[in-house]
Amino acid sequence: MNSFQYVTPRNADNAVSLASDGRFLAGGIDVLGEMKDYIVSPRLLVNVKGLPGTQDIVVGGEVWTIGANVTVAAIEHHEDLKRVFPGLQQAAAEVGSPQIRNVATLGGNLAQHSRCWYYRQRDLRCAKRGGDTCYARDGENKYHSLFSGGPCISPLVSNLAVALAALEATVVVRRGGKDVTLTIPELYQKAWDEVTAHNSLGPTDLMLRIQIPNAGRRSAYQQVSEKAIFDWALVSCAAAAKVDGRKLSHARVVLGAVAPIAYQVEAANELLEGKELDDALAARAADLILKDADPLAHNGYKVPIAQALIRRTLNQLVA
Ligand SMILES: Cc1cc2nc3c(=O)[nH]c(=O)nc-3n(C[C@H](O)[C@H](O)[C@H](O)COP(=O)(O)OP(=O)(O)OC[C@H]3O[C@@H](n4cnc5c(N)ncnc54)[C@H](O)[C@@H]3O)c2cc1C
Ligand code: SF4
């Protein structure tokens, strides 16, 4: 690994001013891996993990907040989160392994970089790393996107992003001396638009906390992976809705690991509005969500998995 300096700022503004020269470090699971593999070589690591106010979970009221440095394990084991936002708890429980969840933070999970094996190969400079070729498009694309907005087909693999998108959470970011609030779609829009972007955050944008509206909706999360632990999802699905018997309102269905964003289709959410969920309705919603899927040579298997996950996750909501 290249040599680097390490600094622990006292507050968020210090952290932001230092980051122009380096990278934020939270749990380090992702950024240290990238450094060891020579994918990135920051001169300075800005340790944000102890920043005041970023390790708290504040429950109750119309909006619940989770600090950016709360660990994935703390989300997984928090009894109130489990009760009110079970979809988020289920998504957290599926991240990596217990060891990873004990160290990984919410902010780091949301901002983790591409897992594309060409991106992670030190001797290749694919389009995401500033080169001119996407090696995955005509290469080994088994784990890649079914939907994309540009040349990069590396999917968003953060479990928490998918669950938070269904819950319509927002992210408070310290940007240029003030706090701005981004929706989850806004947090990833740039990854859809720009080949080199992993998300919409600039190098000095610091996530402070996530806000989740407590709108009395049920939530659920399911994924399919190759391995039971220590693995990312091949496809994941989160859903949230108000449920009355089997009748859904304010439903949101979101797919992960199939696009550079947390993928949802407004027409499917509208289709579910005010309807009693049955197998036919769930299948129609799945068809709408997957209507524009554009499988590559090796990832067509994701389509039937996504169809099944959408049906299962919706059924879990009303169970
Ligand atoms: C074997 C393995 C399996 C995994 N499986 C899964 C899985 O199934 N699902 C899943 O979702 N993830 C999975 N992961 C990814 C893992 O969850 C993330 O790497 C981890 O959550 C990153 O969190 P961290 O705190 O360690 O972040 P770090 O590595 O410290 O940071 C990651 C990135 O986020 C930036 N960052 C950190 N905090 C902030 C902040 N507050 N504001 C702005 N930017 C910030 C850093 O600069 C860096 O770019 C897996 C990882 C491994 C190694
Ligand atoms: S999918 Fe993206 S990260 Fe992977 S090779 Fe193509 S441009 Fe690079």
Image (cartoon, rainbow, N blue to C red):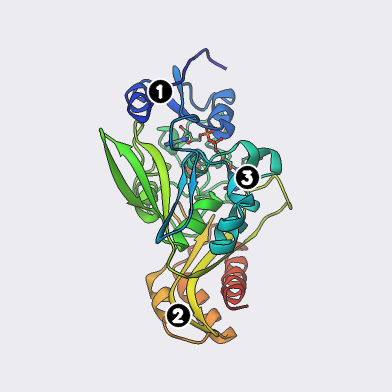
Q: Residue furthest left?
A: 177
- Distance from label 2 to label 1 (Cα)? 47 Å
The amino acid pointed to by label 2 is: Leu
Q: Is residue 114 left or right of residue 140?
A: left
Q: Position of residue 294 (x, y in %)?
A: 48, 63
Q: Is residue 175 left or right of residue 303?
A: left
| Residue drawn where x is 52% and y is 27% of the image | 39
Tell me if residue 272 comes above or below residue 215 in the rendering: below
- Distance from label 1 to label 3 (Cα)? 25 Å
Specify the label residue 73 is tagged with: 3
Q: Position of residue 232 (x, y in %)?
A: 63, 49
Q: Position of residue 86 (x, y in %)?
A: 58, 62
Image quarter (top left, top right, bottom left or bottom right) of the N terminus: top right
Number of the front mark, 1 or 3:
1
Task: Give whichever of 96, 2 is nearer the camera.
Answer: 96
Task: Give whichever of 282, 177 is nearer the camera.
Answer: 177
Number of the front mark, 2 or 1:
1
Q: Kindly identify which residue carries mark 1.
A: 10
Q: Is residue 89 shown to the viewer in this render? A: yes
Image quarter (top left, top right, bottom left or bottom right) of the C terminus: bottom right
Asked if the residue at tag 3 contacts the one at tag 1, i.e. Cβ–Cβ closer than 8 Å, the answer is no
Q: Residues within 10 Å of mark 2 (few under 14, many from 20)?
A: many
Q: Kindly identify which residue carries mark 2.
A: 272
Secondary structure state at the residue bearing disc 2: helix
Asked if the residue at tag 3 contacts the one at tag 2, i.e. Cβ–Cβ closer than 8 Å, the answer is no
